[in-house]
Structures are given as C-alpha cells and as structure tokens.
Amino acid sequence: METKVLIVGAGPSGLATSACLTRHSIPHLILEREDCYASLWKKRTYDRLGLHLAKEFCFLPHKPLPPDAPTFMPKDFFLKYVDDYVSQFNINPLYHRTVESASLVEAGKKWRIEAKNKLEGNVEVYHAEFLVVASGENNEGYIPDIKGLSSFPGEIVHSNHFKSGSRYKSKDVLVIGCGNSGMEIAYDLKEHGARTSIVIRSPFHVLTKELVHRGMSLLNYLPVYMVDTLITMLARLKYGDLTKYGIYRPPRGPFAHKNVTGRSPVIDVGTIGKIQNGEIEVVSEILNIEKNNVKFKNGTEKNFDAIVLATGYKSAANKWLKDYKYALNGDGMPKNRMPNHWKGEKGLYCAGLSRRGLFGVSMDAEAIANDINKVITGQK
Ligand SMILES: Cc1cc2nc3c(=O)[nH]c(=O)nc-3n(C[C@H](O)[C@H](O)[C@H](O)COP(=O)(O)OP(=O)(O)OC[C@H]3O[C@@H](n4cnc5c(N)ncnc54)[C@H](O)[C@@H]3O)c2cc1C
Ligand SMILES: NC(=O)C1=CN([C@@H]2O[C@H](COP(=O)(O)OP(=O)(O)OC[C@H]3O[C@@H](n4cnc5c(N)ncnc54)[C@H](OP(=O)(O)O)[C@@H]3O)[C@@H](O)[C@H]2O)C=CC1
Ligand SMILES: O=C(O)C(=O)Cc1c[nH]c2ccccc12
C-alpha cells in the first residue's frame, strides 16, 4: 500500500502527528501493534496512576482541555480527552499491525515498511515518502542484569505489567528502582498491606507535584539555575534531610538534571512519609539473589516473595528501523540535540523521544507536520 506519510505507533505522539497532518490535508496512515490507541496509558500503567504534571503541560495540539479539567488529571480524565481527540480529528489507526522492518528503497527516495498483521498472520508491505517513528521512549521494559535473578522462585513483574498492590497483601515485596514508577508502586504495595522494601542506589531529587508545577511555570520567566535554587530550597524545607534514609540529591538542580540526563525528579505521592515513619524500608544496591534470598551491598540480606522491577524503559525502534542512523542513535533515541531532535534525514522523523512528556510530544508533532508540509509544498 502507498501513502504519503506513515506513522508507527498510535500513542499520544502518533495521534498528535496525525491531527497536525490532517490540518495540512496531508494523507497518512498509522500502524499500531495493539488493538487500541494510547495503549501504554490504557494497558501498561498501574491503576492509581494520575498525571504528575499540571494540565497546562498535558494536552495535545489544536485541542484545549475541557474547562472543568482538574489541575492534576486522573488517568481516566486524560483518556476521555484522548477519546475526544481521536473522534474530533477522525483518526483511524490500523490496529494489530506490528512494524517489523523499515528501510530506505528506490535510491533513498521512499521508505518500505513491513508490518505483521497479527489477526491475519500475514506480512503487509507499505511504501511512504515520510516515516514518523512514534513508537515511544517507554516501548519496552528495561530489565537489568542482576546476578541470580533467574533463580528467584517468586513472581517477578516489571512495572509496566503492575496493576495494583492488592495481590500482595502480607507478602514481602522488593521494589527495584526508585524513579516515579518504583516510588509510587512501593506506596501502593504498602497501602495494600504488603511488607515493602525499595532499592535506592543513586541520587535523585524529591519534589511535590505542586513544586514541579511552580518550577515549570517560573521557567517561563527565570533561568533554570534560579528556579532550581528556589525549588530545591522549598523541597528541603518540606522534606528535611533525607540522607539518613539513603536519599541524596544530585549536584545539579532538578530541572537542570532533567535537561541534562532526561531523568525526572521523583514527584512524591506519599512514599517519603512512609519511608520516614518506617513503613517502607530502604535497602541498598543488590549484590546477588539466591532463590528467595536477596543480599545487598551493605551486608544485609532478606527473603522476598515477589520482586517488582521498576527499572525503567527503553525505545526499541532500532529493532525494526533498519536505517535508523538517519534520525536515531544506537539506543533508539534521537541523534540530533534539542531543539532539532525530531528531524532526521531522508524523510525520517521521530516524535515523543525527547523525554519531555506530553508537552514534548505536542511540540514534536507540530514541528514534524509543519516540516513535511514545507517539503511537500516546496516540491510542487
Ligand atoms: C507510567 C508512566 C506515566 C507517565 N506519566 C506522564 C505524565 O503524567 N505526563 C506526561 O507528560 N508524560 C507522562 N509519561 C510519559 C509518556 O511517555 C507520555 O505521556 C506519552 O505516553 C508518550 O507518548 P508516545 O506516543 O510517544 O508513546 P507511547 O504512549 O508509548 O505510544 C507508543 C505506541 O506505539 C506502539 N508501538 C510501539 N512499537 C510498535 C511497532 N513496532 N509497531 C506498531 N506499533 C508500535 C505502542 O503499542 C504504543 O501504542 C508517563 C510514562 C509512563 C511510563
Ligand atoms: N504519574 C506520572 O506522571 C508518572 C510518570 N512516570 C514517568 O515515566 C518515565 C519512566 O519512569 P520509571 O519507570 O520510574 O523509570 P526511570 O528510568 O525513571 O527509573 C528507573 C529506576 O530504576 C533504577 N534501576 C535501574 N537498574 C537498576 C538496578 N540494576 N538496580 C537498582 N536500581 C536500578 C534506576 O536507578 P539508577 O538511577 O541508579 O539507574 C531508577 O531509579 C519517567 O519519565 C517518569 O517520570 C512514571 C510513573 C508515574
Ligand atoms: O513524567 C515525566 O517523566 C516527564 O517526562 C514529564 C516531564 C517533563 N518535564 C519535566 C520536569 C519535571 C518533572 C517531569 C517532567
């Protein structure tokens, strides 16, 4: 099948790019491996997830949020907005299509895309002038190489399959990873009566969602270092010294740290209080696992019934994008630096790979559609 633009993935990035292309009347197709759009949000997030960022940073292009949107939206409120977005822009992804390869053909003028149709069991071939990678920076769970992990006889679940702590009442559960997923899952486990421990091995910032909101608003007027100084000071006042729990702040401030490393500050949902009052135990880096027994670098050891790997994600675009070098590096992330990270060569683009959440998604989608429109109209 021939199309002008082919978009891989019907998450917020693919949907936003589709809406922006439609506004330029540019024909396109979206291929999605699942049976629905926004599959990360619908199928691979835990029940209690709500948006950590305020509503002014969490909408898609050309459609404001409804006036009754709360400052911090619950997941279902955001998903209802996405439903309305899809209807308004009449977006019709082709579902059950897993893109398995994409390469340049016809002397570098076209992209040839192969997708497995999971319903029919056959491979479909598409040709497009422009290819947009919108398969997500959270595409695959990252599973670290931890010595002895495979000997663990209990349940091991990655955070993208974790739904709720309700199944773990009175169990000893170890959460590995203390990003936003690990910290919130630890809280959820404790709320459901699990005896919960969390591995903390590197420094990170702890803020409230209100502090992040205030910081992001101030960034419109003040330089990053000033906002960082102010927000870190307010966070210190709120949380006090957390080093006795093994929680250290990185040398850079929270927004500079996000800009440089892509790592978000932990937006506390109540986990810190549970760590401070001893309900959740902090443990150090893992030395090795032997059956149910986990040994930690500080010499302690403990038996666990289940492990949650909240160890982060990776982009898996390089697995299918054979000619990735025109836009991505070896990790499947943009090779160009901001603000031109979304633009590759030979008609290749990437949306939603800049670690800037939905705000970044919207900016990429608009930039990509405008650029494709410029190329097409320039060609005429
Ligand atoms: C737990 C969690 C909470 C988050 N909360 C927030 C938040 O509150 N605010 C915020 O701004 N950001 C948040 N984010 C960041 C999140 O990445 C973005 O909100 C958003 O989902 C990115 O959209 P996307 O379309 O780029 O990627 P995704 O939402 O991951 O969508 C990618 C789509 O591509 C499909 N796909 C992948 N590979 C293929 C293939 N080979 N063939 C066909 N289809 C494919 C997938 O099935 C998926 O539907 C959160 C992320 C996680 C993991
Ligand atoms: N409500 C919301 O808005 C939410 C947003 N998110 C966002 O989704 C994205 C993904 O977050 P998340 O899933 O937390 O992933 P992150 O990549 O942010 O965090 C991964 C964590 O795993 C740790 N880790 C990795 N390997 C090991 C190991 N071998 N041993 C011990 N620890 C290890 C990392 O520690 P180290 O630093 O030492 O490598 C880090 O603490 C982020 O941008 C996050 O902000 C997530 C949840 C909720
Ligand atoms: O939810 C995330 O991790 C995001 O990537 C969203 C985001 C973009 N910029 C930020 C600054 C501070 C905290 C979260 C984010």
Image (cartoon, rainbow, N blue to C red):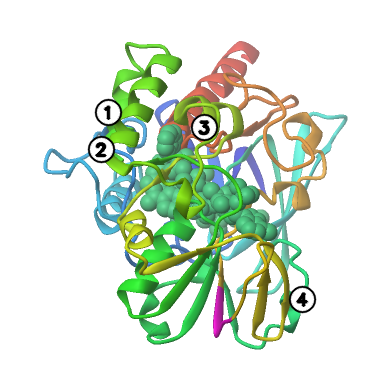
Occupied quadrant, residue 260 = top right
List x then y, in percent, for residue 261: 60, 33
Looking at the picture, does residue 356 appear above or below residue 1? above
**Residue 214 - label:** 1
Q: CA distance from mark 4 to mark 1?
A: 44 Å
Residue range in magenta is 303-307
**Is the residue at mark 4 in contact range of ligand 2, meaning its CB lies under 8 Å from it?**
no
Q: Residue at x 23, y 39 (%)?
A: 65
Q: Do the residues under discs 2 and 1 have CB atoms within 8 angstroms? A: yes
Q: Nearer the viewer, mark 4 or mark 1?
A: 4
List x then y, in percent, for residue 138: 57, 51
Q: CA distance from mark 2 to mark 1?
A: 6 Å
The residue sitting at the left extreme is 68
Lower position in the chain sequence, tag 3 or tag 4: 4
In this rendering, position of residue 276 left or right of residue 330: left
The amino acid type, in three-letter code, at marker 3 is Lys
Q: Magenta stretch mostly in which secondary structure?
A: strand
The amino acid type, in three-letter code, at marker 4 is Gly
In this rendering, position of residue 193 left or right of residue 332: left
Q: Nearer the viewer, mark 3 or mark 4?
A: 4
Badge 3 element? helix
**Is the residue at mark 3 in contact range of ligand 3, meaning its CB lies under 8 Å from it?**
yes
Badge 4 element? loop
**Residue 148 - label:** 4
The amino acid type, in three-letter code, at marker 2 is Glu
Crowding near pointer 1: few (<14 within 10 Å), some, many (20+)?
Answer: some
Q: Do the residues under discs 3 and 4 have CB atoms within 8 angstroms? A: no
